[in-house]
Every structure is written in C-alpha cells, then in structure tokens.
Image (spheres, rainbow, N blue to C red):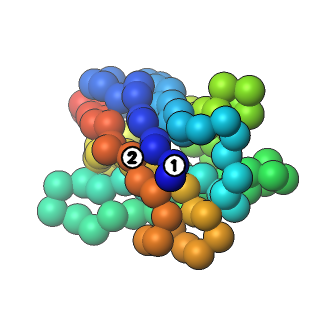
Amino acid sequence: QVQLAESGGGLVQAGGSLRLSCVHSGHSFSGLAMGWFRQAPGKEREYVGNINWSRGTTFYADSVKGRFTISRDNAKNTMYLQMNSLKPEDTAVYYCAADMGIGWNSGYWGQGTQVTVSS
C-alpha cells in the first residue's frame, strides 16, 4: 500500500512562491502517475496537474499552466509542485495523489496541505 504525505504549505502574499512536496512510502513508486489536486472552501476538488512517473512528462490545468511546475526525484521518492506568481484564487488545500493505473479516484491520496495566498 502506498502512503503519501504532503508538506510545504503556508501563507504567502500574492505574487509569491511556494514549493510543495509529496513523499510516497515504499522502496520505489510503481504506479502510473502522481498528481496534484486542490480544493477551495465551498468548491469541488480541482485537478492541478500530474507527472507520468516513468516518462517524466507533465500535464497542467489551464488555470496554473505557466505558473506551476511539477517535478520528481526518484531517489527521494518525492514529487514537487513549484508554485510561482501565486494568486488569491490559488488558495486551497492541496492534495497529492497516486494513480496506480486504474484512475485517481481508485488510487492513493495524501492528507493535504493548506496554501493561503493573501491579496
């Protein structure tokens, strides 16, 4: 079983940057992809982006494209989300997830980390 743990959230002013980390348990990740999602108060969970674990290719939602970057460090079993030019509308709880090949909803999820962007 995969366990995921996010860290790096916090309070930042608009225009600032944060880097989130997601560490997965186990010797090495054997799933299809890992990704980031977020959920703001009163809103549905939103896809942010993901990285194909074996190929390293990345995909992003239009709302974050050009501002957010996903990367991975296989040696550290860690995925990162570098967030630049943050906006108040980026405020949300950010979750990392693992797709083991049968979709995000059937995969593994972390507990989330709060990101708050002040105007």
Nearer the N terminus, badge 1 or badge 2? 1
Q: Residue beneath label 2, please? A: 110
- Tell me the mark number nearer the camera, choosing from 1 and 2: 1
Residue 68: image location, x then y, percent: 57, 42
Q: Give residue 76's position: percent from left, percent from top.
A: 66, 26
**Disc 1, SS:** loop
| Residue farthest to the bottom, as pictured | 102
Rendered position, 43 above or below 89: below
| Residue 72 in view here | no
Residue ID at (39%, 63%): 46
The quarter holding residue 87 reads top left
The three-letter code of the residue at mark 2 reads Gly
Looking at the image, residue 58 sits to the left or right of residue 116; the answer is right
- Tell me what residue is drawn at x 42 percent, y 35 percent: 6
Describe the element under mark 2 as helix, strand or loop.
Answer: loop
Q: Residue at 46%, 44% (x, y): give it.
A: 3
Pick the front one: 3 or 113: 3
Where residue 41 sits, quadrant-wise, is: bottom left
Residue 21 in sight here: yes
Q: Is disc 2 surrounded by few (<14), some (14 to 19) or many (20+) residues within 10 Å?
A: many
Q: Amino acid at mark 1?
A: Val
Q: Residue at the location (71% across, 31% down)?
A: 73
Does the residue at mark 1 contact the one at mark 2 (Cβ under 8 Å)? no
Residue 113 at x, y = what percent?
32, 37
| Vertical comparison of 85 with 100: above or below | above
- Quadrant including the C terminus: top left
Q: Say which residue label 1 marks.
A: 2
Residue 9 versus residue 103 in the image, above or below: above
Which residue in the rendered view is the most extreme toward the right?
55
- Give the image location of residue 107, x and y in percent: 49, 64
